[in-house]
Amino acid sequence: MTDNTVLRVDSLWVDYYTRSGPIRVVQDVSFEIRRGEILGLAGESGSGKSTVAQAVTRLIRPTVGRMGGDVWLQDENIAQLDRKALRHIKWKKVSIVAQSAMNSLNPVLRIRSQFDDILQSHGQRNRQKNFARMCELIEMVSLSAEVLDAFPHQLSGGMKQRVAIAMALLFHPDLVIMDEPTTALDVIVEREIVSEIKRLQRQFGFSVLFISHDLDLLLRMADRVAIMYGGYLMEIGSVQEFAHPLHPYSRALLQSFPAIGAVGAERRRGIPGYPPDPANPPGGCRFHPRCSHSSERCGSDLPVWEAVEGAGDQRVRCIRWREIPNESHTGSD
Amino acid sequence: MRYLMRRIIFYVVAFVATITINFFLPRAMPGNPAEALMSKFGGRLNPLALKSIEIAFGLHEHEPIWNQYLQYLGQLLHGNLGTSLAYYPASVSGLIGTALPWTLFLVGLSTIISFVIGIIIGSISAWRFGGAFDTFMSTFFTFTYAFPYFWIALACLYLIGYLWGVFPISGAYSMDLVPTLSGSFVFNVIRHAILPSLTIIFTSVGYWAVNMRNTTITTLAEDYVTMAEAKGITLRRILLRYAGRNAILPNITGFAMSMGFIVGGAILTEIVFSYPGLGNLLFQAVQQEDYPLIQGILMIISFSVLAANFVADVTYSLLDPRVRVGGNQ
């Protein structure tokens, strides 16, 4: 791996235990994130995108499920580390802004103590220094230092999310995973938070794995985008490459969003059918029952994670991508 | 503070209601204590004696009930709960004063020990959810909790106390000792308390352990605990400040309730082990129809339940900032 790569996930899989045995919710997921890059990970609910975030940070409890594959955070394989070594890496090299900042802060502790818990757990016991660092961070996310003395329930949703971002940047991590950080917020606050993230990311140069179901948002803020469906990555590529997506699912997904500034009666199209049941997934390509381009082979052959020759590092998982006529997602077909 | 003020007002109102009911309830029953005492003598006392007993007991049948109530309140303020019939001429407050410390010591300490052990085991069970420790403990505690208390108490009394003679079988201290604060007396008291205390802990610890286990399992699924793990916070801190601190909140109320019932709650223990506490006293009072004593003990019990609830409210507001409505915002 080159020095430029912050995270390399290789053949990651995750099982969750259920009453009727383990079910596979993430399968054969491989991707890289480069230094200073924002990778957007999109997918429907239940596609496994949040599970990827949890697996990358080894947050899947052994009682809940199991995982395999490699997760290289620079020169350390997170998937293989023992708990002790793992604890020292966590937050220093990779941090998370969770799906619901509302519930990601401990309701009975002041924000200040929650910062302190992280700092002291990582051996930083100088109270004055710690406090100075908290103030610095809290002002960095455009909040006043008074917030430190508040309890989480005294803050608004947007403020809590800013606090969560400030916490994530505590140790200047190489990678910040943002799991739907704006989903619980209204559109105006979402906009503010997103531009805040962009600004901080430019200032400090950390990489971001930004998970969202909002593909439109990802295409506006990310450098590269990955699309997940039924536990598999279906396509990954730069935002420019996504102007002409190769996978039928990516195209269908893009067509289900209204184009901003579109004039006239452009029709949005939903994708017929429902996402696959992870306990009983369809054979072959997970998307074939809903795909308008599916052939007989799609139901039996599992497509491989195939590099698109000539393109940067665009990859696609579809056996028919060469045969399907290329088209722009804003055009009509 | 506004939260606490509201609670204090609530408790004052509740307490006044309690003592009022405590006053009117016995008076709504037919007869009075003097007549009860008279009937004990099978009518062998003349009406003048009844009159003098009424005066001695402070019964004022001829006065309007409103005046009686005011007098009763006045007596209460002076700590005067009347005179016992069964232990005449001992005062009710005197009897309660002698019995209460023993109950507080035995049942109070047992409940606290049981709570602490239960909370610790429950937390560990939850952290090892589904593991060998958890499976064993959950089964074991369901078993002990379902056990009839009197059976366990009698079995312990018979086996450990009588057959093996490890611990004394009755009383709070040996009859030949004079209560002093000497080491040998304290040791004697502790030796007497161990057996009844063990039976209380054995049958009640399961309740706390199972409850704590369940609330902890719920708390462990909360995002802030997962996030604390992601932050690399030490396990000790996560256990205490993130999982434990939040999981214990629902148990505080239950604990305070049981602290309130300590005063009257261990009747079986005290009877089986002939322990000179309040439960035993209440049992004797009921058996001997000692109305003033029953009334006095019931009032003490209701007062302690209210006091314990108040302590729970205060503790809860200290532990959970979300209930400090209008607090330090």
Image (cartoon, coloured by chain):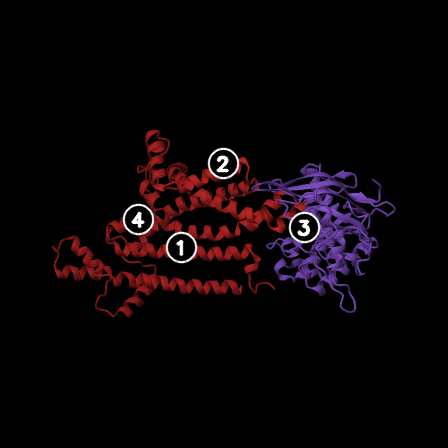
Q: Are marks 4 and 2 in contact (CB under 8 Å)?
A: no
According to the picture, the residue beneath numbered tag 1 turns out to be B304
Residue topped by disc 3? A116
Q: Which chain hosts label 4?
A: B
As drawn, which residue projects farthest toward the right?
A: A310
Labels 4, 2: front one: 2
Same chain for the residues at labels 1 and 4, yes or no?
yes
Quick one: SS at disc 3? helix
The chain carrying label 1 is B
In which image quadrant can residue A23 be found? top right
Kind of residue at badge 1: Ser
Instruction: Give the residue number, with chain letter if any, for mark 4.
Output: B281
The C terminus of chain A: image quadrant? bottom right
Chain under callout 2? B
> Toward the viewer: A205 or B249?
A205
* Nearer to us in this view, A15 or A265: A265
Which is closer to the viewer, label 2 or label 3? 2
Check if mark 1 and mark 2 are on a common chain.
yes
Q: Residue at x 45, y 65 (%)?
A: B9
- Give the residue at mark 2: B136
At label 2, which amino acid type do we have? Phe
Please report the residue visible at 55 percent of the width from the left and 61 percent of the height from the top.
Answer: B324
- The secondary structure type at the circle numbered 2 is helix
**Residue at the spot 45% in from the left edge and 40% down from the top edge:** B141
